[in-house]
Image (cartoon, rainbow, N blue to C red):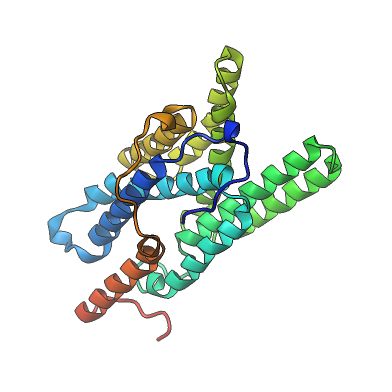
Amino acid sequence: MSATASAVPDTFRPASTWTAWGQWLALATMTIDHLTRYVAPDSWQLDWAGSSIGRIAFPLFAAMVAWHGLFNTRNPQRYARRILIIGLAAQIPYMMMPRASDALILNVCFTLAAGLAGGAWLRELATRQRRGELAAHWTALGAAATLVVWYLLGDWVEYGHNGLLLIPLLMFAMHHLSQAGSHLSARLLAAAAAFPALWVAGQMNASDMAKSFTVATCLAVLLLAAGAAQRVPPLGTLMPRRLWLAWYPGHFALIAAWLWVMGAASWPLA
């Protein structure tokens, strides 16, 4: 879920070296979450891992997608389509995972792609209105249409309505935090802009432990947007692009194969 080089002026772009570290951490925590949820025997009592380490993965993926969509790509919609392709490749093995309901749920890549597309669209509307290229009533209509899509799609994707909201809110917060500068009033405004994202992150889980890990992950990335990113050293060995793109569908396929061998897989096409 990397992005192409940005056309955004350098003055608007904090350093992105942290995302190389974030990729490894996101994939590791996601894999730990899925292995403890689907593969580890119940007798091992590893539920705590899913409620702690496992709750880092989604907000970190969402933050990286929001960051790239805001700072590092000329075309966020094309970036969202690339994420969607990964989701399409992963959907069948994802549907083979054991779950309480047989309802169709689209995997997290659909959540990330839709959240990025919505956030980029709203940002484009606001930019065009500010430049005088779009009348206020058309901006309001576009925002209303986005709200309708969010409401209809929320029941069909992983992490639901809150998951779809997180990326646009992170983009909003990151923008204000990266532009705050040293003026106190601007910093207070940026802090206020960060609150909605942190509040939504806190609504995404039931347990206090899960809430704390999700909110802490979002807070850490927002601090990076506020200036801490400039202090993150580059990672010596970058993750191979093919490995990054293939990990999500690939690890589900391996888990599904293991569950099939063990007789525990759910076959959606049966």
In the image: residue 246, left or right of residue 168: left
Question: What is the x, y in percent for residue 231?
Answer: 38, 29
Q: Residue placed farthest to the bottom in the image? A: 270
In terms of image quadrants, where is residue 56?
Answer: top left
**Percent x, y of residue 214:** 38, 41
Residue drawn at point x = 25 percent, y = 55 percent:
32
For the C terminus, the quadrant is: bottom left
Residue beneath the point at 52% across and 57% down? 111
Q: Is residue 124 visible?
A: yes
* Image position of 74 (left or right of 4): right
Q: Looking at the picture, does residue 229 appear above or below residue 243?
A: above
Q: Nearer the viewer, residue 3 or 136?
A: 3
Is residue 214 shown above or below 263? above
Vertical arrangement, residue 245 with respect to residue 258, above or below: above
Pick the front one: 70 or 54: 70
State the residue at coordinates (51%, 43%): 67
Q: How many badges with numbers are in the image?
A: 0
Q: Is residue 183 left or right of residue 32?
A: right
Q: Position of residue 136 (x, y in %)?
A: 84, 40
Q: Residue at x 28, y 72 (%)?
A: 254
Tell which residue pokes out farthest to the left in this image: 43
Nearer to us in this view, 106 or 233 = 233
**Front-most of 99 and 238?**
238
**Which image quarter: residue 229?**
top left
| Residue 4 position in % (x across, y down) | 54, 53
Residue 105 visible to the viewer: no
